[in-house]
Image (cartoon, rainbow, N blue to C red):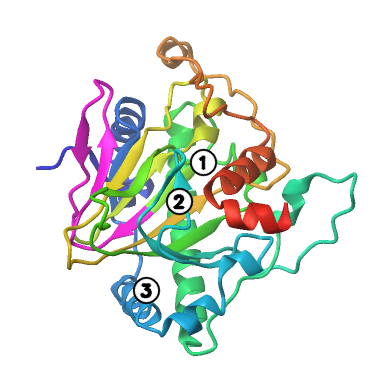
C-alpha cells in the first residue's frame, strides 16, 4: 500500500482505456502525484543511468567543476552541493542539469531573455559514456510523459493531441542527475525545499532510499515511498493554468538522507516550447464545476507565458549563474 495512486499507463491502448482514464483523472485531480508503471522503459536504461551517475559523482572535484553550470548561460552542467536554492534556502544536493542538445541562439537586446535558455549541454571529458546514457534516458522519459499527457488530455474530455503543438523539436525539456549526500552539519534536513514544478509534467526515477514527500490537500506531508519499476509523475504549473485549477501543481520536497547515506534520483521535466502561452481549455461541465482556480501566491506567481515562467524559476534557483550571465 502507498499513499499515492498507482497508474498502469499500458492500459491506455487497451479495452481497459476508460477505466484507466477514470483512474488517472482521479489521481491527477485529487492528489496531483502518482506512480506510473507499464511504461516500457528498458531496465538496462533505468539501472544504467544510476550506474553512470555514481561514476560521475565519484570523479575528483576538479573534473566535476570543469563543467560547472556557472560557465553556462543556459543553466547546464554541474551544480556543487549547496549552490541551488529553493524558497531562499540552499538545497543539500549536487547535480548535473541536461537539456536537448542545441546550438546557442544569438539573442538581441530587444528579444526576450528566455531565448538564452537554448544551448548546448556540458559533458565531463573523464566520463564520455554519460552523454549517451543520459540522452537515451531523457528520450525515454519524454516518451513516457508524452503518453501520460495524451491520456490526461483524453481524461479531461479533449482530443489526445490537444497539447501536441507545444511539444515539437523545440520543446524545452530538461533532466537532472542528482546525488543527495547525508544531511548537512548545520542540522538542516532540506534536500530540496518545498516547491512546485513549472512545466506540464515531471517524472522522477528514485532509488530505494526514499526522502520525497508530497503535500496532500489537508496540508499533511506523505512519503512517496519508492516502488520498484515505477516512476513518480506529478502535475506542473502549466497544467494548473490550462485547467483553471482542476489539476493543481502539488508542493513537494525532499528530506535529506541520514548522515553517511547517499540518495540518487533522476527527474525529468516536460516543458513546452519556450514561446508557448498556455490558454485555458474548455472542460466538460461536470469537470469545470470541480475547477478550483489558479493558485495565488505572491512568492510564486504563475505566468501563462512559459518562457518567462521558466527563466524566473532558473534565476531564483541558481543565483550565481544569474549574477554572471543575467
| Quadrant of the snapshot with the N terminus | top left
The residue carrying mark 3 is: 49
Q: Tell me where residue 211 appears, x and y as whole percent.
A: 22, 51
Residue 183 as seen in the image, left or right of residue 274: left
| Dot 3: element | helix
Q: Earlier in the sequence, mark 2 or mark 3?
A: 3
Q: Please tell me which residue is depicted at 37% across the width and 75% down the height of the picture.
A: 53
**Disc nearer the start of the sequence (1/3):** 3
- Say which of 61 and 59 sits in front: 61
Q: Are marks 1 and 2 in contact (CB under 8 Å)?
A: yes
Residue occupying the far bottom of the picture? 126
Q: Nearer the viewer, mark 1 or mark 2?
A: 1
The region drawn magenta spans 204-227
Q: Is residue 290 visible?
A: yes
Residue 271 spot, x, y in % from top left? 57, 47
Q: Nearer the viewer, residue 19 or 294?
A: 294
Percent from the top left, x then y, of residue 225? Answer: 17, 49
Determine if the magenta segment contains residue 225: yes
Residue 171 can be seen in this image: no
Is residue 179 rendered magenta in the image? no
Kindly indicate whether the residue at mark 3 contacts the one at mark 1 (C-beta within 8 angstroms). Answer: no
Q: Front-most of 145 and 22? A: 145
Quarter of image, res 181: bottom left
Disc number for residue 200: 1
Residue 145 is labelled as 2
Inter-mark Cα distance, 2 to 3: 18 Å
Amino acid at each position: 500500500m502507498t499513499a499515492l495512486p498507482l497508474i498502469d499507463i499500458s492500459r491506455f491502448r487497451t479495452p481497459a482505456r476508460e477505466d484507466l482514464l477514470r483512474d488517472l483523472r482521479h489521481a491527477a485531480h485529487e492528489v496531483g502525484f502518482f506512480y506510473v508503471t507499464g511504461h516500457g522503459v528498458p531496465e538496462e536504461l533505468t539501472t544504467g543511468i544510476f550506474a553512470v551517475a555514481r561514476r560521475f559523482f565519484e570523479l575528483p572535484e576538479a573534473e566535476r567543476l570543469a563543467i560547472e553550470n556557472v560557465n553556462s548561460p543556459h543553466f547546464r552542467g554541474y551544480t556543487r552541493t549547496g549552490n541551488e536554492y529553493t524558497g531562499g534556502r540552499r538545497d543539500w544536493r549536487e547535480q548535473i542539469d541536461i537539456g536537448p542538445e542545441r546550438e546557442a541562439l544569438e539573442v538581441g537586446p530587444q528579444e526576450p531573455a528566455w531565448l538564452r535558455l537554448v544551448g548546448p549541454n556540458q559533458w565531463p571529458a573523464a566520463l564520455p559514456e554519460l552523454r549517451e546514457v543520459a540522452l537515451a534516458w531523457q528520450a525515454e522519459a519524454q516518451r513516457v510523459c508524452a503518453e501520460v499527457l495524451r491520456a490526461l488530455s483524453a481524461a479531461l474530455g479533449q482530443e489526445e493531441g490537444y497539447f501536441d503543438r507545444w511539444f515539437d523539436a523545440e520543446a524545452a525539456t530538461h533532466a537532472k542527475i542528482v546525488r543527495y549526500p547525508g544531511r548537512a552539519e548545520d542540522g538542516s534536513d532540506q534536500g530540496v525545499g518545498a516547491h512546485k514544478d513549472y512545466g506540464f509534467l515531471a517524472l522522477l526515477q528514485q532509488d530505494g532510499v526514499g526522502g520525497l514527500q508530497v503535500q496532500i490537500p489537508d496540508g499533511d506531508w506523505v512519503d512517496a515511498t519508492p516502488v520498484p519499476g515505477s516512476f513518480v509523475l506529478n502535475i506542473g504549473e502549466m497544467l494548473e493554468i490550462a485547467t483553471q485549477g482542476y489539476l493543481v501543481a502539488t508542493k513537494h520536497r525532499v528530506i535529506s538522507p541520514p548522515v553517511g547515506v547517499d540518495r540518487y534520483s533522476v527527474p525529468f521535466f516536460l516543458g513546452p516550447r519556450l514561446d508557448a502561452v498556455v490558454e485555458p481549455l474548455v472542460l466538460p461541465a461536470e469537470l469545470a464545476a470541480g475547477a478550483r482556480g489558479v493558485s495565488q501566491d505572491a512568492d510564486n506567481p504563475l505566468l501563462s507565458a512559459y518562457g518567462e515562467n521558466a527563466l524566473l524559476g532558473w534565476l531564483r534557483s541558481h543565483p550565481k549563474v544569474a549574477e554572471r550571465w543575467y
